Image (cartoon, rainbow, N blue to C red):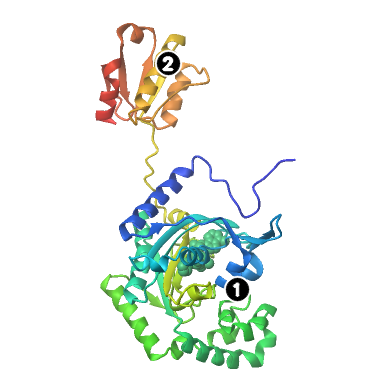
Amino acid sequence: MAFKVPRGTQDILPEQTPKWQKVESVLRELSRVYRYKEIRTPIFEQTELFQRGVGDTTDIVQKEMYTFDDRGGRSLTLRPEGTAAAVRAYVEHKMFGYPDQPVKLSYMGPMFRYERQQAGRYRQFVQYGVEAIGSADPAIDAEVISLAMDIYQTVGLKDLKLVLNSLGDKETRDAHRTALIKHFEPSIGEFCSDCQNRLEKNPLRILDCKKDHEHPLMSTAPALTDYLTESSAQYFNQVKNYLDVLGIQYEVDPNLVRGLDYYNHTAFEIMSTAQGFGAITTLCGGGRYNGLVEDIGGPDVPGIGFAMSIERLLLALEAEGVELEVGDALDIYVVAIGEEAKLKSAELISSFRTKGIAADMDYVDRKMKAQMKSADRLGAKFVIVIGESELEENAVNVKEMESGNQEKIEFHNLVNYLLEHK
Ligand code: HAM
């Protein structure tokens, strides 16, 4: 039997990892610049955390979680997202008592959702996300959004669209909810069973239905923005003012509701507008969640954040034809002819490596020509060929592959030469 990766997962092969590492380094660097400190939480959590945190009526909780009982009979779930766990940790470790508020966290790691596999939708994917917990200042909404945009721009993406909405406060949501029920109830029989269930429990979710999105009642549904309370509308305006000051362009889409229950006020998504990106264009999603900390057992503290998958970021780069500069090239390849030369090579590459010079040699007894080809394939900047005469002279021609230039350097001067020229 031939084994394969589980459906919806992928191996990231050695030729692909440099791109991943490059993106990861951009993410780490921008987390540092914006001061979002990394938090690492477990891959699995108590199932109830997500039921409560993400919301019982969401697709994630109803259909997509990898849930299992451990040997002690506890129900555990592989994390489908990072916000609930970050907030759990915030509450558990009483971060609301930290002197510097808001607490700004970032995370990066695998998430798991049992979704239908398609381009850009995996069952295991890597999310980078941030959470700013402890501030209800519209300036931080703009900061979080600008960090997300900065990430995409730093890696070189151009075809981006930021879509923004306000989901308002509780009063807004209650008024809108009543209007939605009134709108959908007479024809709810024409909708899928999920939507029928959502009508009473959480009618806002109907607007996000993947099956019924073409139904004519969808486009005429009452928009949340028409029900915004004065203070919510004012908050939304302030967020927009900050975005304007930061020079960040956006579109307001009153139908943007997001797929998780914890949002209120600011909600946003960043889409790729690149041709041929595929059906799923959302690169990043986030928003404000002012009730979540309390729902998870903490004090009434507001929060906002976003998450993005590295998989979709890489797909967007591909769609836009952006090549990342990955910097994984080899500094020097040492070609050895004969046993004694091989011993010398081993000694030399060890001295290179201790100085941070990336060096490699042949370990499968190939002829000189094949070794030269390897050096070429590996993108080595320099090549040296060690044979009898080099051993006798204690010196070797260092060939710069791109220019073809050669310079004779004594063995004991090689490290310095390479450090100067690599
Ligand atoms: P989300 O919209 O469920 O939000 O996911 C955020 C991002 O994760 C998506 O925009 C996409 O880039 C990526 N993503 C989600 N599902 C998949 C998948 N199956 N395959 C590949 N990529 C995927 C959240 O997870 C919230 N926790 C975001 C947040 C943080 N809100 C506030 N703080």
Q: Is mark 1 within 8 Å of ligand 1?
A: no
Quadrant in which residue 143 is drawn: bottom left
Mark number for residue 19? none
For residue 281, say whether it is visible.
Answer: no
Q: Nearer the viewer, residue 235 or 16?
A: 235
Q: Position of residue 104 (x, y in %)?
A: 38, 64
Q: Position of residue 270 (x, y in %)?
A: 43, 67
Disc 1 residue type (three-letter): Thr
Labels 1 and 2 touching (C-beta < 8 A): no
* Label 2 secondary element: strand
Left or right for 287, reference 76 = left
Question: How many angstroms separate mark 1 from mark 2 (CA)?
Answer: 62 Å
Tell me what residue is drawn at x 35 percent, y 63 percent: 147
Disc 2 residue type (three-letter): Ala
For residue 269, say whether it is visible.
Answer: yes
Tell me what residue is drawn at x 54 percent, y 92 percent: 179
Mark 1 or 2: the one toward you: 1
Above/below status of 402 relative to 275: above
Quadrant in which residue 413 is drawn: top left
Q: Disc 1 marks which residue?
A: 58
> Counting residues from the N terminus, which is met first, the one under dot 1 or under dot 2?
1
Q: Position of residue 181 (x, y in %)?
A: 59, 90
Q: Nearer the viewer, residue 278 or 41?
A: 41
Q: Disc 2 marks which residue?
A: 336
Quadrant in which residue 150 is drawn: bottom left
Which residue is the extreme one toward the left?
420
